[in-house]
């Protein structure tokens, strides 16, 4: 055997050895999780495990096909997630990679990449969204229109609430409509919805008329808005419902002076910050509001099997907010007991308004749901990514008084399961 052959053989053995070690690592992770060691493998995002719901009325072939497809989909997602996020020494490797990129001034972005990063001039991070086609926007609008039809058939008032992304529609020159097209996508969606006769409240306009510093409404390291901003947004939302539908509300419930603020210094590293790592950014300060007035709420959540009654604080998950390990701490989700479930319900024992309000929405409405519950008898939040069943059927059965469809600009994209209302 010649020298080239021996080198080729050695390289082949090295590659095979790496593959074997990788497969053994995946197997070890799988065994550990099945043994209950889930805290060792906490992800910074949930892992989707199915593309099809298997129904009792499906024939045998359909059940086999759906089960097989779900199995392949879950295996692929688990493999990608654990190899990316739980690779031994991954955090140190990524931090060093970021330091090197910063050193050479190489800050590229990939619009289609999960949690892609744009570095804004004032230290804030943002995601990059590609421009969606008119066909994609039209498909999303049609789905929301179908939700409107079902809601109105069930006797509910329906409207669309556009929440903001962390790129300013009226600013961020060089970013907005250049590197990020989330606002363009939202504008196109609202135009299509209005063509369907759907009423729309666009909070980006309210923000432009109210605030001077757009970015300060958001965390520096995350795409979510801060809880005090959500309090303001809830007041805007209630004002809109009073104006459009005559639903009176107590404006004093959304007065910032009616709340004590708990301030946790450098306690939150958002999803964008976790990707940029501490080599490129610092954790955010995290604010938690506590009403000064008496509250009594009954809070339930499907996936975590939560059912508790008490003051406002029953909504919070301090285990998550204070989780040991900044890279795994999900403070924002902790504002509604780590909301990553299909449905949560808040019933207000002291409510003066008898209405039931249902939000079919994304995570930006987590604190909005909580604050709305201070005014109405029952408020629910459904997320199409996690709700097991038909949102449309749920509306038909529960018959809420108001249905609000709400999405931030950053989720308006092709093929996203959050718009699956079944």
Image (cartoon, helix red, strand yellow):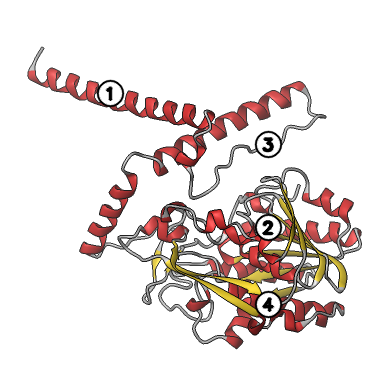
For disc 1, the neighbor class at 10 Å (few under 14, some 14 to 19, many from 20) is: few
Residue 412 at least partly seen: no
Indicate left or right for 285 with 362 as reference. left
In the rendered view, tell whether residue 236 sits above or below residue 372. below
- Which numbered tag is attached to residue 292? 4
Residue situated in front as seen by the camera: 340 or 58 = 340
- Where is residue 95 shown, x and y percent of the image? 30, 54
Please tell me the numbered disc located at residue 17: 1
Nearer the observer, disc 4 or disc 2?
Answer: 4
How far is the residue under mark 2 from the one under mark 1? 47 Å
Q: Is residue 361 visible?
A: yes
Q: Say which residue appears at 50% left-offset and 62% top-offset.
A: 129
How far apart marks 3 and 2 lie (CA) works out to: 19 Å
Residue 108 lies in what quarter of the image?
Answer: bottom left
Marks 4 and 1 close (CB-CB < 8 Å): no
**Quarter of the image where the N terminus is located:** top left
Q: Residues within 10 Å of mark 4 (few under 14, many from 20)?
A: few
Q: Nearer the viewer, mark 4 or mark 1?
A: 4
Q: Quadrant of residue 172?
A: bottom left
The image position of residue 247, as x and y in percent, is: 85, 77
Q: CA distance from mark 4 to mark 3?
A: 46 Å
Residue underneath mark 3? 52
Most extreme residue toward the top is 1
Q: Earlier in the sequence, mark 4 or mark 3?
A: 3
Q: Position of residue 300 (x, y in %)?
A: 74, 53
The residue that disc 2 covers is: 140
* Mark 1–mark 3 distance (CA, rounded to whole Å): 36 Å
Which x, y percent locates residue 87? 36, 39
Q: Earlier in the sequence, mark 4 or mark 1?
A: 1
Instruction: Name the residue: 66% across, 70% down.
Output: 162
């Amino acid at each position: 055997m010649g020298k080239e052959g021996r080198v080729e053989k050695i390289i082949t053995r090295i590659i095979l050895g790496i593959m074997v070690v990788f497969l053994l690592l995946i197997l070890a992770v799988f065994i550990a999780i099945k043994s209950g060691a889930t805290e060792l493998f906490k992800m910074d995002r949930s892992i989707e495990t199915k593309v099809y719901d298997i129904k009792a009325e499906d024939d045998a072939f359909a059940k086999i096909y759906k089960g097989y497809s779900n199995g392949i989909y879950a295996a692929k997602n688990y493999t990608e997630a654990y190899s990316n996020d739980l690779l031994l020494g991954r955090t140190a490797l990524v931090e060093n990679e970021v330091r090197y990129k910063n050193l050479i001034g190489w800050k590229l972005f990939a619009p289609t990449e999960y949690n892609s990063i744009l570095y804004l001039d004032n230290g804030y991070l943002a995601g990059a969204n590609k421009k969606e086609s008119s066909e994609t926007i039209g498909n999303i609008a049609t789905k929301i229109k179908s939700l409107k039809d079902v809601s109105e058939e069930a006797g509910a008032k329906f409207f669309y609430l556009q929440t903001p992304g962390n790129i300013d529609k009226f600013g961020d020159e060089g970013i907005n409509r250049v590197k990020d097209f989330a606002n363009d996508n939202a504008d196109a969606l609202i135009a299509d919805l209005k063509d369907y006769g759907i009423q729309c409240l666009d909070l980006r306009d309210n923000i432009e008329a109210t605030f001077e510093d757009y970015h300060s409404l958001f965390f520096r390291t995350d795409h979510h808005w801060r809880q005090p901003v959500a309090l303001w947004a809830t007041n805007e939302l209630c004002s809109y419902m009073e104006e459009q539908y005559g639903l009176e509300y107590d404006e004093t419930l959304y007065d910032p002076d009616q709340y004590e603020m708990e301030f946790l210094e450098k306690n939150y590293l958002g999803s964008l910050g976790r990707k940029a790592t501490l080599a490129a950014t610092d954790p955010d300060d995290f604010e938690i509001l506590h009403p000064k007035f008496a509250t009594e709420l009954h809070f339930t959540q499907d996936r975590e099997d939560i059912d508790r009654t008490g003051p406002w604080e029953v909504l919070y998950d301090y285990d998550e907010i204070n989780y040991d390990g900044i890279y795994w701490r999900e403070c924002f989700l902790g504002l509604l007991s780590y909301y990553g479930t299909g449905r949560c319900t808040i019933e207000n024992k002291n409510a003066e308004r008898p209405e039931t309000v249902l939000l079919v929405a994304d995570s930006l409405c987590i604190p909005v749901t909580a604050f709305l519950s201070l005014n109405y008898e029952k408020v629910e939040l459904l997320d199409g990514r996690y709700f097991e069943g038909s949102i449309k059927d749920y509306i038909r059965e529960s018959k809420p008084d108001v249905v609000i469809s709400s999405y931030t600009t950053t989720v308006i994209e092709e093929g996203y399961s959050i718009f699956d209302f079944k």
